[in-house]
Image (cartoon, grey):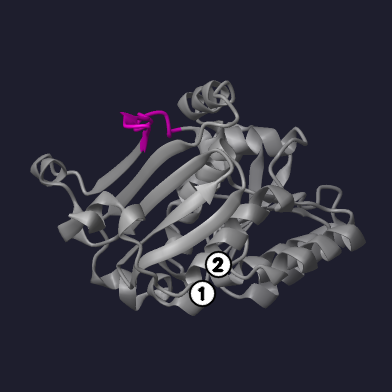
Amino acid sequence: MTNFALVGAAGFVAPRHLKAIRDTGNTLVAALDPHDSVGLLDNYFPEAQFFTSFERFERHLEKLRVQSKDPVEYVSICSPNYLHDTHCRMALHVNAHAICEKPLVINTWNLQSLQEVEARTGKRVYTVLQLRLHPTLIELQQKLAQEPADHKLDVVLTYITRRGQWYHTSWKGDEEKSGGLAMNIGIHFFDLLIWLFGKPEHSEVHLSQPDRISGALELERARVRWYLSVNVDDLPESSRAQNKFAFRSITIDGQEAEFSEGFTDLHTRVYEGVVAGRGYGIEDARHSIELVYTIRHADIVANPTRLHPMLAR
């Protein structure tokens, strides 16, 4: 049994990490969040020490490192995006590995500095790229690998998920803290596209608003038109009629790639890989973070031949 600590215990994604720690047979000994609405800990690790002060939390982990026979070996990081870099560094400095939610960082230069801390401490920074472990998507990647190298696929990615007014008031709506829409809700899909179709060769942005962003990519094996939105008005009527407030679609040469199921245990699969020494690290996250950084700072261009269907209509 391995000891874990967790940062961001009151956050949206924390339950997936708590479940993964439990389901892999490990234990949580300490948790941190400035907010104390963390009663969910009782469902998983009621004996875990809880802190609202970062300084006291870090001091506790250091004390365990120095005085305990069972120090913390992994720190799971579920904090707001702009704090990921700091919390990864903290984990490594208390002689633990970091398991960090996406995006690993929001600025590209932080990748190199994290690698330097890895080299100094001998510990690793792992990131959560759970879509790469989805059985249907693994099959799709294997199928795509058989495509002729000179054939560029036509891909259309659409992801629309309703978010209320709270979203724009919270840190998620602050681009300096979240990295903006492309980083906060898009990083999962940009990593998936790169994993499936190869590294980016060209990128352009056709629309950029606080609640919608769209553009086109040229990858090694695909031309991609993409659209991301948190505006409920963008949801298809069919979704709203079924009281569904998220819509995700990827078509490849006009054929829908279906992967709406199979998400339940992906974080557990991530944790299994990490504790076995085969988790995804900094270099695995690099291309998608660099791509989104480029998208965030791109000028808007008019290219009617490459518009996503949501814009073309």
**Residue stretch in magenta:** 251-264
| Residue drawn at point x = 51 percent, y = 74 percent | 297
Residue 63 relative to residue 120: left or right: left
Q: Is residue 33 visible?
A: yes
Residue at numbered disc 2: 294
Measured as percent of width and height from the top left, residue 299 is found at 45, 75
Q: How many marks?
A: 2
| Residue drawn at point x = 74 percent, y = 40 percent | 2
Of 102 and 313, the residue lying toward us: 313
Q: Amino acid at mark 2?
A: Thr
In magenta segment, residue 300: no
Residue 84 sits in which quadrant?
A: bottom right
Label 1 near label 2: C-beta < 8 Å?
Answer: yes
Residue 151 relative to residue 313: left or right: right
Secondary structure under the numbered disc 2 in the rendered image: helix
Measured as percent of width and height from the top left, residue 5 is found at 66, 54
Q: Amino acid at mark 1?
A: His
Q: Is residue 100 visible?
A: no
Residue at numbered disc 1: 297
Q: Is residue 144 above or below residue 14?
A: above
Measured as percent of width and height from the top left, residue 4 is found at 68, 49
Measured as percent of width and height from the top left, residue 8 is found at 53, 62
Of 63 and 79, the residue lying toward us: 79
| Residue drawn at point x = 65 percent, y = 33 percent | 272
Say few, some or many: other residues with alpha carbon within 10 Å of mark 2 (under 14 / 14 to 19 / 20 or more): some
